[in-house]
Amino acid sequence: MLDDFFIRALLAGIGIAIIAAPLGCFVVWRRLAYFGDTLAHSALLGVSFALLFEINITVSVFLISIVISLLLYMMQKRGGLSSDAVLGLLSHSALALGLVAIAFMTWVRIDLNALLFGDILSVSRFDVGFVWAGSLFALAVLVMIWRNLFAVTVNEQLARAEGMNPDVVNMIFMVLMALVIAISMQIVGVLLITALLIIPAASARQLATGPEQMAVVAAIIGIAAVVGGLYASLGWDTPSGPSIVVMALMLFIISLVLGGKTRRHKPNHAEVSPDSSRGE
Amino acid sequence: MSDNVSLIELVNAGVARDGRWLVRGVDLSISAGEIVTLIGPNGSGKSTTAKMVLDVLHPDEGTRRQGTSRLQIGYVPQKVEIDWTMPLSVERFMTITRKLSHSDIDYHLQRTGVLHLKKSQVRTLSGGEMQRVLLARAIARKPNLLVLDEPVQGVDFAGEIALYELIGEIRDELNCGILLVSHDLHVVMAATDRVICLNGHICCQGSPAAVAESAEYKNLFGERAIGALAVYRHAHDHQHLPDGTVLHADGSITDHCHPDDGHHHEHHDKQEADSNA
């Protein structure tokens, strides 16, 4: 069964969705979308390292992402990384550096499109195994730290005052981000990883009334986007990453319509105003 | 003052940010069953001091000592903002740092008068409702140290008195130490064992009874218009000028004021307060 490239892609995609979507809830709650983007773009540096030292791309991207995410985290802690200008600078610089580094390696022939937008054909048996091992491991860790991570997300000082250690859970969260970026890069591509984190979570927000419920709904929406997107990609010969993201977007629009309906019947749910997301 | 061993103690503690002392020279101890109130104007270092007590901020000078290894803290922060992206009911919010049984959740929401909001989304609560939920959540942890940073903001006057009564009840029930932060003295006074006036450093402290008998206190409470700041007059031998320098009673001007720079007489006030108690 695993001989079929499409089955492999489906399995890998579902493996990614079950961890990317719940983790994406935290990305949304903590307003780390741009942060995730920066991290994802720096994955291209990981690719160039993999080519240079002839090691597995996924492993290389994972290691580089961990380094970059810890660096970003430390910069953020020092308070120097609050503005989106700095993140934007780092994000696109990392992307450009990766592209230039790859261009310099004239001895390797590489499909840049596959790196940027994902390629279902490139998913090997090893990758499927790596995705599921990484995904299940990350999911187990996320469940373990869930209460603490959530408390820290709601109010870091409150969590710290009441005996939790925000630094440890934040660090673990960063490593999980790096892991998810590494395992999703080949399927959705560097440019679209953040979409896989955020769009299912944002869709689930419209339908959920509790954080745990939102994570589960996001995972289901993520799986639906992967399956639908990959079939569309196969049918119309479109690149797999964009197809998955377009499918996720369609599910988001559906969730807006459904969420709008339920909200009107529940006075407890205030209208979602996009403006308030920019507060603080 | 209580004879108990203190739960938590700050010794000559201060926090500096960007080369400026937010608060400095704070000596403070809280014992089991004692309510200590920090008052002071905006920017006087009340929340900073509370955060040192909570171990959220580490003192840049001085020390924090914990009198017991089993410190169970309940904290009501000055502000908790829930992002619209986060679906969070009051019921779930109650359990963010600790698991609670359904009956515990109901009981504590009942005590602060917000049981009817149990299923509501936190971000739809009014300011006063939020404070009641925060207080319910903090006391449900059965803390032995309760830190309340402006716990009644946004609560109407009648509700304010009821909440202070409740805070007193909680103290009796759990025998916990309570640190109360307020910029507003008149209601706080009755429930407090000790008042500490803060303005970048400890200006004065004493029992509220002693302060209440003083002419300055009557002056303050006779005319509400004078406001909470008036209470400082009995202690203030110096004035913080708009440019950050300090004008002392003897007419000298210095860049900062420190507890040990000889321009203060808070010990006098403290002794007076204690002898009146």
Image (tube, coloured by chain):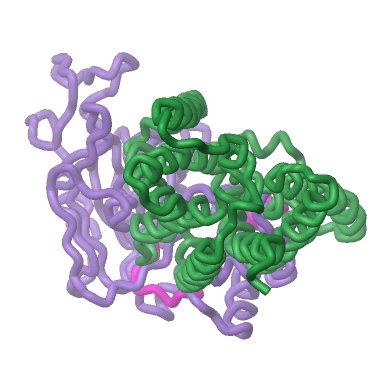
A96 vs B20, nearest the viewer: A96
Residue A116 place in picture, x, y as percent: 59, 37
Residue nearer the viewer, B250 or A229: A229
Say which quarter of the image contains residue B175: bottom left
Q: Name the residue located 33 percent from the left edge and 51 percent from the top edge.
A: B51
Q: Is A268 situated left or right of A154 in this image?
A: right
In the image, residue B82 above or below residue A46: below
Question: Image check: B182 left or right of A271?
Answer: left
Which chain appears green?
A: A
Q: Is residue A81 above or below residue A233?
A: above
Residue B267 sits in quarter: top left
Chain that the image shows in purple: B
Residue at the extreme front? A107
Q: Is B133 within the magenta? A: yes
The residue located at (67%, 49%) in the rendering is: B85
Q: Position of residue B245 (x, y in %)?
A: 23, 17
User: Over which residues does the magenta segment extend?
Assistant: B124-147
Decide which of A178, A132 is in the foreground and name it: A132
Q: Is residue B97 visible?
A: no
Q: Is residue A63 above or below residue A190?
A: below
The residue shown at (71%, 34%) is A275
Q: Is residue B225 magenta?
A: no
Residue A41 vs residue A67: left or right?
A: right
Q: Could you say where residue A26 lies in the image, as x and y percent from the top left?
A: 56, 54
Magenta-drawn stretch, dominant element (helix, strand or loop): helix
Please identify the quadrant where the C terminus of chain B is shown: bottom left
Tell me the residue at 20%/39% (across/down): B24
Q: Is residue A94 visible?
A: yes
Quadrant showing the N terminus of chain B: bottom left
In percent of width and height, residue B54 lies at 32, 58
Residue A210 against residue A108 in the figure, above or below: below
